[in-house]
Image: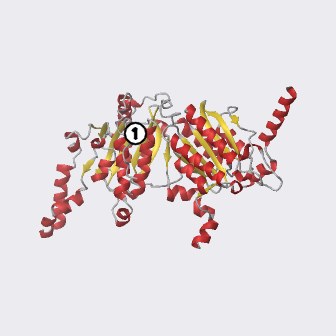
Amino acid sequence: MRQLRAERDALADKIVAGRPEGAERQHQLGKHTARERLDRLLDSGSFTEIEMFRRHQAHGMKADGTRPHTDGVIAGSGTIDGRRVCIYAQDFTIFGGSLGEAHAAKIHKTMDLALATGCPLIGLNDGGGARIQEGATALDGYGGIFRRNVQASGVIPQISVILGPCAGGAAYSPALSDFTFMVRDTAFMYLTGPDVVAAVTGERVSHDELGGADVHARQSGVATFVYDDELSCLDDVRYLVSMLPSNNLDPLPAAPSQGAMTDERPRLAEIVPHDPSKPYDMRSVITEIVDDGDFLELHELWARNIVCALARVDGEVVGVVGNQPAYLAGALDAAASQKAARFVRLCDAFSIPLVTLVDVPGFLPGTDQEYGGIIRHGAKLLYAYCEATVPRIQVIVRKAYGGAYIVMDSRSIGADISMAWPTNEIAVMGADAAVGIIFRKELAAAADPAGLRADFRTRYAEEFMHPYFAAERGLVDEIIDPAQTRSAIAAGLAMLRGKRKFPSQRKHGNVPL
């Protein structure tokens, strides 16, 4: 028995050590090995590996009959800050991390364990796609992964980390995940590679131009977070996990109270100009509101006219949605609507309260937006808010015009608490545009149209856009001093902490996809 145990331990040590030449090649590419990544991400000594000795059973894979253990993926469970996660890491040093039957079966088992135990699932992707030599069984393996992604959606957090190639069908699992991390220069994700693109379309494009981290961060919106190196990427995966519940039934991870209910921030009044046409950075407002000025922004480089972030207020995790006047004046367009809608649904799925900071001039006008389906995409955000049952607090920082005001979690679509700064302007449209429509005949006949327009603008603003217009009609609960925004949000969250969900009897609604 001792001899058998010694043989087993020796084999296990050999498997863990891996091939030195493979590790060296990874390092030359600016990448770490799968086990080095696990060591960085998980608490020291916490990883428990499953199916270490598994090997593929296919014939004709290599002329030398190579059948390495693990079959190119390391799977198991560990902890992050003491909290259990299930994880798999593709090993590019074995068959290029390609997915075959045994490889897929290990990932399936890891996903099943994550769902059964109610803990987050993390996939470290660094593989060449389906293993060609295994044919249809490899494709079947991907189908099993996708089906489990969908079954786990909204039940456990799913995090995909792209640390190398992720091509073909492999790209759909990250697309089905809740969060996708990518590393510049080494991570690539696309359905068809540069060679296929060139053969079919004649277009010559590099791996990075086709599916690099910045492409998916800025243009496609597939990447939630991007980094310059693997270590900072993995550190932020740990940070993200600290902000999420283990599953949809567990409570959010709490942090100590910071006395936010008595914390005034006078700088907020300095950050936001009174003139509704002047830009500022909404992230500066968020910094003043959240604990330690610390928040994790999702899709920072995509649809920059809206900010979506996870943060804490008085120790409680919240999801923050805010218009960004520094980009496109904070107007909502198709991309911003999609970005915010998915974030709202994510927060609702995992019982994360929502704080919405409103400074919106309306929906972005133009044929590009209308032809691109802005009505349909805007309806996604509207649907997401209307369906959300988590505590919802709206703060109108400055302007809130037209349908965009309604969509940004107004009282009419279910916000629990609506507060406004004294600078708020809630109206169908801005004063200039309104005057041009209401008094167009008078202006056309006037000897001094500029002076008359100014008079009409003043009258309209005083009558319809004064700070208390909406509050007098019950559409705003309170007009607050900007300095009290952090304390008012903290008090509102405390009041809503016991909010119950009242699920409807229907199976589901028909979201406007």
x then y, percent, for residue 226? 57, 51
Q: Secondary structure at mark 1?
A: strand
Residue in the image at 35% along x and 59% along y: 364
Query: In the figure, is residue 453 to the left or right of 422?
Result: left
Residue in the image at 19% along x and 62% along y: 437
- Which image quadrant: the N terminus? top right
Query: In the figure, is residue 471 to the left or right of 206?
Result: left
Q: Which residue is mark 1?
A: 354
Q: Examine the rendering and report whether any part of residue 7 can be seen.
A: yes
x then y, percent, for residue 380? 38, 50
Depth check, front residue: 166 or 217: 166
Residue in the image at 24% along x and 41% along y: 475
Query: In the figure, is residue 16 to the left or right of 177?
Result: right
Spot the residue most to the right: 3
Amino acid type of disc 1? Leu
x then y, percent, for residue 474? 22, 39
x then y, percent, for residue 130? 65, 54
Depth check, front residue: 411 or 510: 510
Residue in the image at 56% along x and 36% along y: 115
Position of residue 354 relative to residue 185, above or below, is above
Query: In the figure, is residue 455 to the left or right of 165?
Result: left
Depth check, front residue: 491 or 259: 491
Position of residue 259 relative to residue 272, above or below, is above
Q: Examine the rendering and report whether any part of residue 129 can be seen.
A: no
Depth check, front residue: 438 or 212: 212
Q: Quadrant of residue 191?
A: bottom right
Q: Quadrant of residue 332?
A: bottom left
